[in-house]
Image: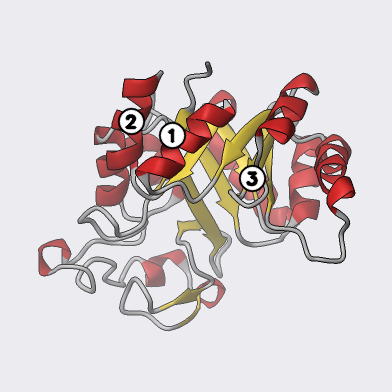
């Protein structure tokens, strides 16, 4: 049986404000193997770690994040909305997060801005800090994932597969996933629970791909994912998933 790696997404589930340095430190302390981070391009082409395209949900800003310079974003409070003890917590940069976790975890970087210039900027920062072998790239923008492998073959890439629309016949769905992985030259297939089953995971492994699940936040889901023999388990609850993984594998 595989010992899957735990991929933690730094939400506000565990008593710390989402996507902040205290949140990433908490994920590491809980034993996560990989941290998923979301990066957005600022108005001055810097790299802000922030989940949403717009400000306001997790800070005291408003509007599209790409309209702000990094200096302007650094003036925002990203902690008070969650708890007064985190007042003054700032939106971090990619470099700050990578430096925090050096030699302790790997990273799955979700690039939210679909710009070739921004991809170059993200890679330059990864390379400058020496993280090429400790990073995988994903994005909601599939062409960006494909271009990543063309330009920077040292980086692993991740494609995410959500539930299929009804018009795609069931007998074609898993073949499509294998075909997409080959076309994109990706290494990790990230599967929503509605998509994953043992047949698909076995097929991915036979083709040389890694299989990941996402949204695994309850005990029965963790046990199910381990039984599937996946390579990575994506979760908002490493406090739950890490101990169960350690007990069962």
Residue, disc 1 = 223
Q: Is residue 46 above or below residue 128?
A: below
Q: Is residue 83 above or below residue 25?
A: below
User: Quick check: marks 2 and 1 in contact, CB under 8 Å?
Assistant: yes
Q: Mark 2 vs mark 1: give the one in front.
A: 1
Residue, disc 2 = 244
Q: Quadrant of residue 99?
A: top left
Secondary structure at badge 2 equals: helix
Secondary structure at badge 1 equals: helix
Q: Residues within 10 Å of mark 1 (few under 14, many from 20)?
A: some
Give the spatial CA distance, label 3 vs label 2: 20 Å
Secondary structure at badge 3 equals: strand
Please name the residue shown 52% across and 16% down the image: 1
Q: Is residue 12 above or below residue 28?
A: below
Q: Residues within 10 Å of mark 2 (few under 14, many from 20)?
A: some
Inspect this view and state whether residue 207 appears: yes
Q: Is residue 92 above or below residue 199?
A: below
Residue, disc 3 = 191
Q: Residues within 10 Å of mark 3 (few under 14, many from 20)?
A: many
Give the spatial CA distance, label 2 vs label 1: 8 Å
Q: Mark 3 vs mark 2: give the one in front.
A: 2
User: Quick check: marks 3 and 2 in contact, CB under 8 Å?
Assistant: no
- Please report whichever mark, 3 or 2, sits nearer to the chain's N-terminal start: 3
Please name the residue shown 63% across and 52% down the image: 194
- Please report whichever mark, 3 or 1, sits nearer to the chain's N-terminal start: 3
- Please report whichever mark, 2 or 1, sits nearer to the chain's N-terminal start: 1
Label for residue 175?
none
Coloring scheme of the render? secondary structure
The quadrant of the rendering that contains the C terminus is top left
Q: Quadrant of residue 149?
A: top right
């Amino acid at each position: 049986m595989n010992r899957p790696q735990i991929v933690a997404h730094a939400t506000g589930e565990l008593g710390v404000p989402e996507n902040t340095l205290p949140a990433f430190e908490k994920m590491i302390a809980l034993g996560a193997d990989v941290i998923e981070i979301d990066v957005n391009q600022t108005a001055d082409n810097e790299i802000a770690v922030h989940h949403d395209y717009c400000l306001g949900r997790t800070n005291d800003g408003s509007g599209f994040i790409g309209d702000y310079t990094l200096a302007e974003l650094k003036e925002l409070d990203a902690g008070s909305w969650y708890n007064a003890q985190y007042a003054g917590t700032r939106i971090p940069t990619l470099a700050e997060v990578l430096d925090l976790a050096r030699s302790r975890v790997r990273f799955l970087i979700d690039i939210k801005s679909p710009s070739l210039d921004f991809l170059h900027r993200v890679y330059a920062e990864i390379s400058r800090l020496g993280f090429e072998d400790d990073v995988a790239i994903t994005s909601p923008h599939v062409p960006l994932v494909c271009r990543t492998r063309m330009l920077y073959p040292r980086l692993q890439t991740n494609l995410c597969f959500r539930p299929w629309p009804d018009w795609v016949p069931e007998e074609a769905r898993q073949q499509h996933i294998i075909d997409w992985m080959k076309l994109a030259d990706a290494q990790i297939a990230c599967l929503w629970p509605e998509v994953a089953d043992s047949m698909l995971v076995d097929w991915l492994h036979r083709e040389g791909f890694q299989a990941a699940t996402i949204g695994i936040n309850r005990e029965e889901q963790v046990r199910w994912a381990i039984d599937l023999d996946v390579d990575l388990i994506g979760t908002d609850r490493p406090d739950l998933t890490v101990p169960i993984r350690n007990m069962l594998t």
